[in-house]
Structure formats: C-alpha cells, structure tokens
Image (tube, coloured by chain):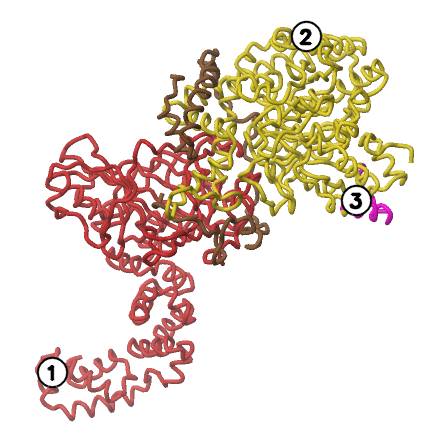
Chain colours: A red, B yellow, C brown
Amino acid sequence: MSTTTGERTLSFDEALASFDPVMGLEVHVELGTNTKMFCGCPTEFGAEPNTQVCPVCLGLPGALPVVNAVAVESAIRIGLALNCSIAEWCRFARKNYFYPDMPKNFQTSQYDEPIAFDGYLDVELEDGSTFRVEIERAHMEEDTGKSLHVGGATGRIHGATHSLVDYNRAGIPLIEIVTKPIVATREKAPEVAKAYVATLRDLLKAMDVSDVKMEQGSMRCDVNLSLMPRDGDTFGTRTETKNVNSLRSVERAVRYEIGRHAAVLTDGGSITQETRHWHEDTGITTSGRVKSDAEDYRYFPEPDLVPVAPSRETVEALRATLPEPPAARRKRLQADWGYSDLEMRDVVNAGLVELVEDTVAAGASPAAARKWWSGEIARRANTEGEDVPSYAARLGVTPAHVVELEGLVTSGRLNDSMARQAWEGVLDGEGTPTAVADARGLELVQDTGALESAVDAVIAANPDVAAKIRDGKVQAVGALIGQVMREMKGQADAGAARAIILERLGQA
Amino acid sequence: MTTDLTRATAAELADLLGAGSVSSREVTRALLDRTAAVDGAVRSYLHVDEDGALAAADDVDRRRAAGEELHALAGVPIAVKDVMATRGLPTTCGSRILEGWVPPYDATVVRRLREAGMPILGKTNMDEFAMGSSTEHSAFGPSHNPWDLDRIPGGSGGGSSSVVASFQAPLAIGTDTGGSIRQPAAVTGTVGTKPTYGGVSRYGLVALASSLDQAGPCSRTVLDSALLHEVIAGHDPMDSTSVDAPVPAVVEAARRADVSGMRIGIVRELTGEGFQPGVQARFDEAVQHLVDAGAEVVEVSCPSFTYALAAYYLILPSEASSNLAKFDAMRYGLRVTPDGIDAPSAEQVMAATRDAGFGDEVKRRIILGTYALSSGYYDAYYGSAQKVRRLIADDFAAAFETADVLVTPTAPTTAFRLGDKLDDPMAMYLNDIATIPANLAGIPGLSLPSGLADEDGLPAGFQVLAPAMADERLYSVGAALEARLAAAWGGPLLDRAPDLTEVSR
Amino acid sequence: MADLTRDDVAHLAGLARIDLSDAELDRMVGELGVILESVATVQQAPIADVEPMSHPLPLVNVTRPDVVRPSLTPQEALAGAPESEQQRFSVPRILDEE
C-alpha cells in the first residue's frame, strides 16, 4: 500500500456543494502525574527502555492495579473544566483484545460509566465567533507500551521481521475526551477541529494536568469523519483517522477526508468503516484496519478495582481549584490592558500572554510590555525557531528588564530610539538596560544651550528651508529636526528641537 | 526427642521452638526427609526448595539465639500453593505455559510468611490455574490422596491438602475460588479456611477469577488454621479489594471453642439429596455434637442456591478468559512457534502457544468465558449471572438474620477415584455445589473433618459459613466440633490414615 | 440460544487467541454445548429487577497516593522474556496497528 499517493479527492468547495461534514474528535491526553495510573512507576518521558516497569504495568501474573488518586482528581477537574457532569458512581472496565504492546491483553478503561459526561467547550474562531463543541464523555484509561519495528523499511510495521517492545509508557494515565458529533460547521469544519484541539490544549495546560505536547504524544487526536448529503439528517459511514498529532494536521486531515469521502460518494461508491492512518509528510490518509464484526472487546467491570464514587463535596472542592478558562481570561486581560482586538490576538498568537501579564505585574505599562516583547526579541526568537518565552528564558531576559527600560524612558533619560538601542544591548547579553545605557553612553542631552546652538547652525546652513517655514510651510520643519538630531548624535529630544526651530522662525 | 516433629501441629511446633526445645532447622529437616520418603507416592510438590527452607530456618534459629523478638510461628515451615508468586522460586500454576517462570517479586501472603520467619518448603501441585477439583488438570500430573493413593486429594489445592495430610508440612497456603481450599480439606481429613473476600491480600495470587479468589490456610487442626490465618490476613494497599479493617480475632475464637447460645443454621438446599449417605450421616452427627456443646439449630432456606453453580460457571470463566489473556508468549513463559508457517506473526505465535500451553479444561473455560462476555450474549449470560450473584448474597443476608453461622457438608462425596470424572466436566463441577455460594457472596467458610464415611472409610468434610468479616465464628464452631469429635474418636482423624512410608517403598 | 456451532467455537477461539486443532474443535463443540445448557439456567432465576453484582464487597474509592515506588531493574523485567534485544522484549512481527 502506498503512503505517498492519495486516493482521488474532490476539492473542498466541490465536496461542500454536495455534502455536510460530521466530525467526532477523540483526544487522548497523558496526565502529568508522578506515577502511572495503577502502579507507582514513574512516568518520565524518554527514559531508558524498560526502566519504569514493575509487576503491575508489565502485567506479570498475580500483580494487581491500584488507582492513582491524583489521576482521578485530574479526570474530575478536566470533566469540570469541560462543563461535564461528574459521575456519582462509576467503574473501570476491561477492554479485551490482544496486542503485544498491551501487557495484560486488556486495557483497563471505562466503558459505559465514564467519570465525566455531557459537557461542552466553547472555541473561538478566526472571525471572532464562538462555536460550542458538545462533549460526550471524558474517561480514565491507561496507555500502552511502545514498539520498535525491526528489519523492514525504517521503523515501519509492514515488512518488519520482529518488534522490540518497551513498556515504560504502559500504564501511564490517559484521559480520553470524546465529542458528540460536531455538525453544521460546513466550510469551517477544519477550522473548528483545529480550534477545538487548540482550545483544549490551552485549557489543559492552564490546569497543569498534562504537558500536552502533541509532538511527544502526550496529547493525541483521532478524527472521526463522515459526510451526509446536504441538508440530510442521516449520518454517513465514518472513518477514524489516527495519529493526527499536530494542530495543523488536525485541520489538514479533516480537509483531506472530506475531499476523499466526497469523491468516493460522488463516484457512487461507499465508505468503508475503518481506521485510517494520517501521514504528516504527504498530507494524506491511508487505509488501516477494517472495523469488522469480529471486533468484540468483551467489556466487563474490572473486578480488581472498586468503583469510584466521588462525593459532591470532593467534586466542589476540585471545582474550586480550576483556573479561569483561557478564553475568559483573555477577555479579562484584554479589558485590563486596553488592547485592541488585533493587538490582543497578536499577543495571544505569539504566546506572550503570560509574559505580558508578568511584566505588567512587575510594574510596566501594558503598552510597553506589548511593545518590547513583540518587537526585536520576537524577531530574533523567530529566526532561532523558538517561541519568545523560552528564548527570553534562555537569554535571561526578564519582565524586570522591560520595567527598567520603560523607567529610563519615562524619567527622560532615554528617548525611544535610545531605548531600542539599550534593549538590543540587553538582548546581546550586555547586561541590564541601565548598564547598557551607561556603557554605550546613551543619555538625552538636557542642556538647552547645546540644542539651541545646534538649531541655529542648522537654520544657518539651510536658508531655503528656513525661509519656507517663515512663510508658513510648517510641515517642512521635519527636515530641520532630522538634521538637528544628527548634529546632536541622536541624544536630543526631538520635541524640544521642533519647538526651538519654530520659535526661531517665528512660528511658535 | 520423643516428639515426631512431622506429626506435631504448628501450635505444638511453635511452643517447642519458642521454648528452645527444637531448632527450626531440625523441624525443617524432618519435614524435608518426610517429603523425600513419601512424596514420590503422594506428589504434593511441584518444587521443593530444600536450600531456601533450610537457610530460612537457620536464619530464624540465629535470630532466636540472639534474643530477637520473633513471631509466634517463626521457624514453623510451610508449603505454598504454586499459584502464589514467590521471588526466586518457580511459579507455574500447574501449567505448561508458565513452566520455568521465576517471579521477580513475592506475593503479599508470601512476604508475610517470610516476615514471620516461616521457612517455605516448596510449591504445591494444583489443577492448572486452579481450574478443577482433583489436581488431574495439573499439567504435571495429579497429586494423590494419602488415605488412598488411587483417589483424588481434591482440587484445585490437592497439593496443599495432601502435603499436610501426609505430614510433609504442618501448614500450607491454599486458594479458594469455588472450594479449592475446603473441598480438598474435606476429602483428605484436614482443615482449610476460605477467609472473607478481601480479608487476605490477593496481590501475587495469580488470578483465576478476581472477584471470587481468596487465599487461606490449610492445616491439620482448627487452631493451626487460625494461627496461619492471622499471619496472612490484614489490609494490603497493593490490593484494591483488600478490606481495611482489623483482622477478626480468629486465634482467640479457636482457643475458646465456645458455641454456647450460637444459632447454627442448616441450609435446606444443601443437605440430603445429592449427598453421599456416609457424608450426610457424619454431618448429622456433627450437628448433634454442636447441639450438645450448647448451640441451637435452626433451618434456613436459600432458594437462589439452585442457580449458584450456573452463575459460578459463567462468572468464573468470564473473568478467567480475561485474566488468562496475559499468557501470550510475549513477555514470559512458554513461546511456541507454529508448525509449517514461515516467519509467523505475533498473533500466530500467541495462538499456537496458547493452544500448546493450556490444558483442555483451561481452554474450555476460556472459550466459555469469551462467549459469555461477547457482544450480544453478555446480558443473557454474564449479566444474568451477576444478578443471580446478588440473589445469592441476599439469601445469605436473610439466612444470617436467623442464624449466626450456616453449616453444610463440604463436598457431596468422599474422594473419588482418579480418572473417574475426568471426561465429564459437569460431573466434576458438581463437587463444588456446597462451597461455591460462599465465593459468590464473598463470605468466609471453613471445612474440618466430620469422620469417615461408612461405605468407603474415607474422610467427609463439615463446612461452616459465617457473615463477611465474622471469620472468628468459623473457628469457634470448628474448634468446638473438633474437640468433641477428637474425644469421640480418641484422637485426630488423621491417626487412622495409612502409614505412607510403607506404601511408597 | 445455547446451541453453539463449530463455527461459533472457532470464532471464539480466534477471539481468545487459541489455535484449536480440528479435533479439539470437534470435541469442544459437544462439551461446551452440555455446559452451556446447564449454565443457561441463570436466565430462569427471578432476576427481572435485580441489580447485577460485580464485586462481592461494597468498597468504593480505593486509591493510592501519587508517589513513586521502586520499579524493577530492566534485568528483572526481562528475565522471563522468551527473547530480548536492546533492553526490550523481542516479539514476532506484528500484523498491523491496533
């Protein structure tokens, strides 16, 4: 099977002309607990193989699971943050199927009694509108081990002679968050999917329950998609696209599957209910396992674990620990800071919200905080392929630097251009803004005598321009100010220079 | 030394050891010698750990000599059913699929034995993964009943029952999912207790049916079982189903042996029809002994017990089909490559290994459980069985309103001949008719000898059942009955068993 | 309903990953039929409004603190492995992703 050439697809517009997309998104999040779901093994990413395993997570005969209390709390908090109801009583269940990376050959999960159910998440779209994604359920389960496929094409499962399994990841707590069918999105389907995953990511990050790194697999998305005829009411057959592990891929995978389904249906074919694999490199999906009747997980209540029955007091206590939802927080901060919608969006998109917040808290004005963090440092960070917060952290540049820089301007020691020079010095590692200003001799000239002499010299050297100004062409003053500033080597206040010129030429 | 150390009870050995009259090494040596003499005929053990047992004995002797405060049973050797994970000692569960597996960890029960300073003599035989009533389903051949070597020692814990009945160990650990401690005790003239579910940790007990399994003591006297019960019971944070409550005062109850004023309930559905006349006769006599000791007899009815066997043979295979899925040739145990397939897949190796590594009974139950859980049949089978389970628990709850304990014959018959029921699974399952309800409800049960059946001269068992966490009542009744029977017989029942040193030559 | 065909048993054996031989299949169809007929009597019990019982004791909320406990060493973890390579469990080729 080829993974480079896709099947026939209709263009997005053609597809939407005949069909309405219906999506279902399943997001798996690895919790950031110290230990695994059912045993005390650590959960560190990137450890040497099979060093974080014990009889329980290796599925050794006789071993028994015990639920991680923090994982349950995190699950409840996630449920609450997604506006879900929290079960008063629920059980774990065994999902039985054989696979070498699953030590017990059943996954301890939840089946018809999830810890959280019936919620929603509001996501903001590019056009400023809000779309409500309904949440079906959020439930607890455990991750599987990881296989290395040997002997075939690099790392591919097909053609491998054997596989090498590392069970470090087996048993890491997962929360699976499942949406209800997302309908009526039309052309916004790809954007809604991406915005949902992004909003969910931000929310979980703000809650500090997971590091939500899609590239490391601590957040993974499966995209269920089907098409129904325009204005129909019966869902079509769906496909489940796995391995969609970046925000951009979520959007692309939805778009691709819409086009592919549309082509199949338009050609008179029918969609096979199957798992499909997403290929980030080529931007297509390929057929995986066909979901057949033979798939029978034989769920039953996990007899080795007792039911989870969180008291309402516990649930309310956990609700009180929830941080402000990211969207509400952004609205509040925008109002506090007095930013325009565009300014706020730029700050959010550049990942500067926390940095600006810290900088304002440290005493800077919101305008200065935005200006300095989104200027030169953002340009440099972008060149380095880093985000500003981590770049700043690496350089040791802090909110206090911005506060200090702004202080130098408001006290009149530096003008804007000097402040930019001082900031560059800070970014170059020359020290604090004051230290840079001292070292570089940056200082506004306060001596009006020197400024007056410079003005007089410039007027004398430019009789034509001076004459125009005397005649009332005040806008020509800019040319003279520029020369005065050059004369003063930039260390003058442009406003003061303008006032003196106009006074000398009788226009004050 | 006048005492035959192999015939001494654990309580007697504890006294001798505590008084410094014997060393643990002497006791352990004597038992190992007994094993060398008789186990070729009885075949209780799958693995004897002579070196480990002697080293543990020496350690206890050294600590005792140094004046260390030791557990009452320190130095008393014990045998452990091969279903318990033992660090550094093979653990096979009587199955080819686990042959050669050496666990890297100890079951909690085993850890408690080691902490108490009890030398572990070896691992006892069992039906494969505890599925059976005779040890005939052990992949390594059956154990034999010391009363008649042509007969079964009960199952699944026939290794543990025969090891104490043949004086190779004063104590053994058994596990009981539907009667695997009590039925073997009954047919070998020994004592065994299934504690309240959750009373003893299941961590390290290789699961057959998680919601039914419970480990417990096997011994020759009621007091010895109580002493061992106290060692292994108690809350374990490694087992979510472990009860976080004080251990019932079982030893005190066994020593007091007081049944005066106690209401003894006879379960109408578990008496009379279907029980061998000699078994029923000994049961009736035993009840009279209890009345003589001051107990009051009441009759109770538990109508749902009619469905207990059916519910059990759905719940057990369902849970087992899932519990035994881990045996797949990937991480430990047997790996079989299928014949005639080039470069077989993991899936094919799993299927070939599970076919070759599991015996017929295990495969039967896995298939049955897979069926009972499969979509479309779940409600009719597993779901219905879970409801019946509730009815049975309710029947017990009602019965315990009018009775403090319930009593029944432990097994319908005395030991049958090896091979007699091997080809008839349903006939084999009927052995558990009286023991299964306690597992379904999670309540404790004890079996002790009630005498020899007239028709075959073989031991019959008397079962006592109590409400959950009232395990001490089993020992009050058991010890009171044991004392009166021993007085009537002029000594322990096992004194009448054949001398195996003759047989094994 | 209690009638199991040979194909049913073969299907179940596939789900249970047991490569039953033809002879085993033949035998098991008969044996399971007898057992199923017997266990199917649970459906005749008065269970209409009965709550299923999955656990023998009514315990709830048993958890452990999120505190790291020692893991096995990789040597201990791999000691029982039929084959191992690069500190990993070596298993035959896997057919496809789950």
Residue nearest the viewer, comparing B338 with B181: B338
Look at mark 1 in the image and give the residue it sits on. A469
Tell if the residue under mark 3 belongs to the same chain as the one under mark 2: yes
Figure quadrant of residue C8:
top left
Residue nearest the viewer, comparing B227 with B199: B227
Q: Secondary structure at mark 3?
A: helix
Residue A367: x, y in percent? 31, 64
- Check disc 1 and give the amino acid type: Ile
In magenta stretch: residue B63? yes
Provide the residue span drawn in magenta: B56-72
- Residue sitting farthest toward the front: B505
Which dot marks residue A267? none
- The chain identifier of the residue carrying mark 1 reads A
Residue nearest the viewer, comparing B61 with A176: B61
Look at mark 3 in the image and give the residue it sits on. B57
Cα separation, mark 1 vs mark 3, equals: 113 Å
Residue A482: x, y in percent? 20, 83
- The chain identifier of the residue carrying mark 3 reads B
Residue nearest the viewer, comparing B434 with C22: C22
Earlier residue among tags 3 and 2: 3
Quadrant of the frame with the N terminus of chain B: top right
Look at mark 2 in the image and give the residue it sits on. B277
User: Badge 1 local density, few (<14 within 10 Å), some, or many (20+)?
Assistant: some
- Check disc 2 and give the amino acid type: Pro
Tell if the residue under mark 1 belongs to the same chain as the one under mark 3: no
Figure quadrant of residue A174:
top left
- The chain identifier of the residue carrying mark 2 reads B
In magenta stretch: residue A32? no
Cα separation, mark 2 vs mark 1, equals: 132 Å
Residue A330: x, y in percent? 33, 52
User: Badge 2 local density, few (<14 within 10 Å), some, or many (20+)?
Assistant: some
